[in-house]
Amino acid sequence: MATSRTTAMRDIYVDANGLRHHLTARGNPGSPIVMMIHGLTQQAHIFDGVAALLSRRFHVYCLDVRGRGESEWGPPGGYHLNNYVEDLEAVRSALGIEAFALAGTSMGGNIAMYYAALHPDRVTAVVLNDIGPEIETAGRERIMAMLTSAPKAFTDLRAVVKYYREANGPVLARRSDDEVAEYARWHVRKDLNIYAWKMDQAVRHLQTPPDPPMPAWDAFSAIRCPVLVVRGSISDVLGPATAAKMATARPGTTIVEVPGVGHAPSLTEPEAYAALEAFLSAPR
C-alpha cells in the first residue's frame, strides 16, 4: 500500500541549546502545528500511530528529548525539567515556529505544562496524557523500581519484548507481539551481538533536580490556553482525585478517561483519539 504524502514520516535534525535534536515530522507544513513530547524512557517513535492519524489534519512533530532516541546526549547533570523546557523553546525557535499545540505523555506532559506556563504566547492548546501536578505514590514507586532494575542490554529482540511485556503489562495488554516488537525496536540499537538501550543511562539515575520555575499546581493554573487531560482508567500515576482537582483548579479543563488502560494511553484508543482530534480541531 502506498504511503500518503501526509502520513509519510520525515526525520529532522536541529541544533538548539547546545545539542543536536532529532524530531519526526508528518503532515502538510502549512497545517496547524502539533508538537508531541514522550515520556521519561521513551522516544519520538512512541507516537508513530497517533501522529500518522493526526497528520491528515495537522503538521505533527515528535521530539526525541535530549539523551533519547536520535537526539544528542546531555552533559552530566543535564537531565532535568529546566533543561527540557529550555530545549523545547530553542527547538521551536530553530524550526521557525510561531505557535503550536503541545501534547505530552507522562514526563512529556510535565514539560508541556511548564512550557505553556512560561511561554503562553507560543502555545495554542495543551494535551496532558496521564500526568498532572501530583503523581500517585504507587506509580512513582513503580517507575523508580523500573528505572533501577531494567537490564542494561539484551541478547535478542525477543528478550526486549519479554521485558516490555513484564514491565508495562497494563499498557501493552491490548497489543500483539508484533506491535510490542515494533515498540521495543525503536528503543534499542544493535551493538555487535547485543541490543542496548537507545538512551543515555544517566537518565535512569535521577539526581536531585534544581527547583522548578514554579510549583506544579501554579504552573498548571498559569496555562492560558485550552487544556485536555487524558487519563487511563487504571493509571497508577494520574489518580482520579487529582484529575478531578485539575478540572476544579482550572475551569474549562477537559478530562477524558480511557477505559481499561493504565499508564499511559497511546492516544490511538478510540476514546482517546476522538477526544484528541476534536480538541485540537476546535476553533481557537
Image (cartoon, rainbow, N blue to C red):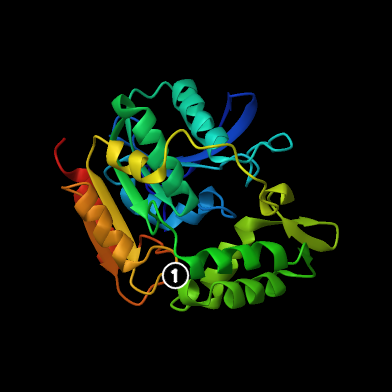
Residue 122 horizontal/vertical position (percent): 33, 27
Instruction: Locate residue 54 relative to residue 188 in the image: left or right.
Output: left
Report the number of numbered marks. 1
Q: Is residue 230 visible?
A: yes
Instruction: Locate residue 233 relative to residue 142 in the image: left or right.
Output: left
The residue drawn where x is 73% and y is 51% is 201
* Structural crowding at the residue carrying mark 1, measured as other residues with C-alpha within 10 Å and reported as few (<14), some (14–19) or many (≥20): many
Instruction: Locate residue 282 relative to residue 269 in the image: left or right.
Output: left
Whether residue 97 is situated above or below residue 189 in the rendered picture:
above
Q: Quadrant of residue 31?
A: top left
The residue drawn where x is 56% and y is 63% is 183
Residue 138 horizontal/vertical position (percent): 50, 70
Give the labeled residue for mark 1: 236
Q: Observer-nearest residue: 280 or 236?
A: 236
Image quarter of the N terminus: bottom left
Q: Observer-nearest residue: 164 or 143?
A: 143
Q: Which residue type carries mark 1?
A: Asp
Q: Secondary structure at mark 1?
A: loop
Residue 237 horizontal/vertical position (percent): 44, 64
Image quarter of the C terminus: top left
Q: Is residue 26 visible?
A: no
